[in-house]
Amino acid sequence: MIKSVIFDLDNTLLDFMKMKSVSINAAVKAMIDVGMDIDKDEAVNEIFTIYDSKGYEHQEVFNEFIIKKISKINYKFLAAAIVEYKKAKEISLNLYPDVIPTLNKLKSMNLNLGIVSDAPSREAWMRLYTLDLHNFFDDVVTFNDTGVYKPAKEPFIKISEKLNANLEECMMIGDWPERDIKGAGQLGMKTAFAKYGSTEDIVDSGADYDLDSLSEIIDIIHQINK
């Protein structure tokens, strides 16, 4: 019996990588427009490389990029990058098409809904509020709540406790097999791989179910609970 459905946030409910790509391209164009002598494509790749090494929530990425390129900080370049990044982020932060109907249906089935995200609390809640998702979820657990990243057990245990659900009564949905699926599965949660949001071609996710769209979870839970 599934009583609670728990979601990862980025690339599960919202298209995080599309937002990141659009925003970084806007930031690089802005730096070029105010006089920074860089190649656009090379700069985008270098910024993604910094994110790959420091994490996609790294807040000093443009500082590091500018210092790497010209050996000192230039606040004109930095301001242009940050402002245009934020503008593009607001415009390009989008949900996958079936998210709202699926969440409404799950709520109508009297299921508790939660989120487990590796994002910092401020960033996770800002995304939820920007996309008008903040009232769908009974509780949210982020990196700041436990101090550890998935697949550590603590985030999954904490969200189950907040939702007053036994671990085996929870379904975890996420796009990252090594973190979302492995982390939840080791505790006995049912797992569903958000294949539609994955940036890699995963042959075997290790999940109980693979989802080509989020809406498929409705029939899966009906089958489990019948």
Image (spheres, grey):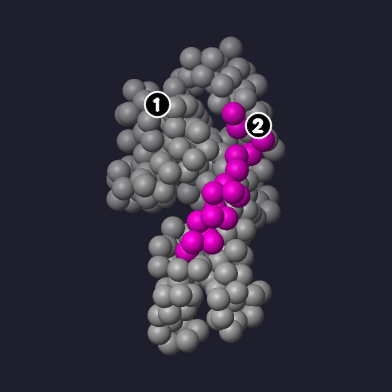
- Which percent across, then down, holds residue 181? 51, 43
Magenta-highlighted residues: 82-100
Residue 179, compared with residue 33, is above or below; it is above
Residue at the image position 40 percent from the left and 63 percent from the top: 59
Residue 155, compared with residue 39, is above or below; it is above
- Which percent across, then down, holds residue 68? 46, 82
CA neighbours of label 2 inside 10 A, class few (<14), some (14 to 19), many (20+): few
- Which percent across, then down, holds residue 212? 69, 38
* Residue 73 part of the magenta segment: no
Does residue 166 appear anywhere in the picture?
no
- Which percent across, then down, holds residue 154? 33, 42
Residue highlighted by disc 1? 138
Q: Earlier in the sequence, mark 1 or mark 2?
A: 2
* Residue 98 part of the magenta segment: yes
Quarter occupied by residue 175: top right
Callout 2 secondary element: loop
Helix, strand or loop: magenta stretch: helix
> Which mark identifies residue 98?
2
In this view, the residue in front, 95 or 11, is 95
> Which mark identifies residue 11?
none
Quarter occupied by residue 25: bottom right
Seen as rendered, the residue at the extreme bottom is 71
Residue at the image position 53 percent from the left and 60 percent from the top: 85
Please state which amino acid type lies under the numbered disc 2: Asp
- The answer to whether mark 1 and mark 2 are in CB contact below 8 A is no
Seen as rendered, the residue at the extreme top is 226
CA neighbours of label 1 inside 10 A, class few (<14), some (14 to 19), many (20+): some
Residue at the image position 64 percent from the left and 75 percent from the top: 40
Does residue 59 appear anywhere in the picture?
yes
In this view, the residue in front, 71 or 152, is 71
